Image: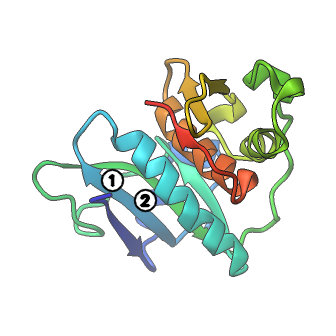
Amino acid sequence: ANLNIQLVLDEPRAFTGFKARLVNFTNVRNYLALVGPECKELDGIVGYYGEQLVLLAQSLGLNSCWVGGTYKVVNRAYNVDLGQKLAAVVALGYGATQGVPHRSKAPQEVAPGYDGAPEWFKRGVDAALLAPTALNQQKFSFALADEEDVPMVRASTRRGAFTQMDLGIAQCHFEIGAGNALYRWAE
C-alpha cells in the first residue's frame, strides 16, 4: 500500500506534555509511526494496515493504543519524506492494565438489514463493532449492495476527525469476522 510504517524504540518525548497527560499516557517509549503518501485515501489505508499490526502486537502479548492527535512530533525519531505525511502513531508496550471494554452500538445501528443478512455478513459486522474507533464513536456503516455474481459490501462513514481511519480499522475487523466468505468491497 506504499506505506512507510516505522517502529520507534526507546523514544519517550512523543508522549510527554499536556495532551499526553489528558489521555493518561505514562512511560510510553515505543510506538509505530504510520507514514504514507499524501493523498485523500491515506487515513483509510493506514487504518486498515495499521490495525493488522495492532492485532499482531496484541497476539504477541503487547498492549497498543491508536493515537491521533495527542502526541508530539519528534524530529529525527522517524522519517517523513517529501510528499509523505505522518497520519497517526500507535503506542506499543506493556500497559498498566489490559484496557477496559467500551460500549458498542447495536449491529442494526451500523448495518441496516442486519437481521436478514447472511451469517458471514453478521460475523463481519459483529467483529467490526469490536474495533477501536476515535472517541468510541463507531461512525461507520456496512450494507449489502446489489449482488452481481459475487456479493458486494458497501462500507461508509460520516464525516469527522479520524473517521476514514476508523473505517479502515473496521474494514480490517469485518474481513476477519467474515472469514473465508466470498464477497467484494463496493466502490
Q: Is residue 25 left or right of residue 79?
A: right
Query: Which mark sits nearer the N-terminus, 1 or 2?
Result: 2
Residue at x 31% of width, y 56% of height? 35
Say which quadrant the C terminus sits in: top left
**Circle 1 residue:** 73
Name the secondary structure under disc 1: loop
Residue 83 shows which numbered tag? none
Task: Find the residue positioned furthest to the left.
Answer: 82
Front in this rendered view, residue 115 or 15: 115
Q: Give above or below for 1 relative to 134.
A: below
Task: Count how many numbered circles sit on residues in the image.
Answer: 2
Name the one closer to the observer, 84 or 70.
84
Vertical placement of 18 versus 155: above or below? Answer: below
Mark 2 highlights which residue?
Answer: 14
* Residues at marks 1 and 2, CA–CA distance in whole angstroms: 6 Å
Q: What is the three-letter code of the residue carrying label 1? A: Val
Q: How is the protein colored in the picture? A: rainbow
Q: Can you see residue 159?
A: yes
Query: Which residue appears at 28% of the width and 67% of the height?
Result: 78
Based on the displayed image, in which of its 4 quarters is residue 91 positioned?
bottom right
Q: Is residue 140 at all visible to an observer of this figure? A: no
Rendered location of residue 123, percent (x, y)? 81, 46
Q: Position of residue 3 (x, y in %)?
A: 31, 60
Residue 102: give x, y in percent of width and height.
83, 41
Q: Amino acid at mark 2?
A: Ala
Q: Are marks 1 and 2 in contact (CB under 8 Å)?
A: yes
What percent of the width, then of the height, locates residue 70?
50, 44
Say left or right for 137 vs 82. right
Crowd tier of the residue under label 2, counting other residues whose Cα lies within 10 Å: few below 14, some 14–19, many 20 or above: many
Q: Nearer the viewer, residue 92 or 49?
A: 49
Q: Secondary structure at mark 2?
A: helix
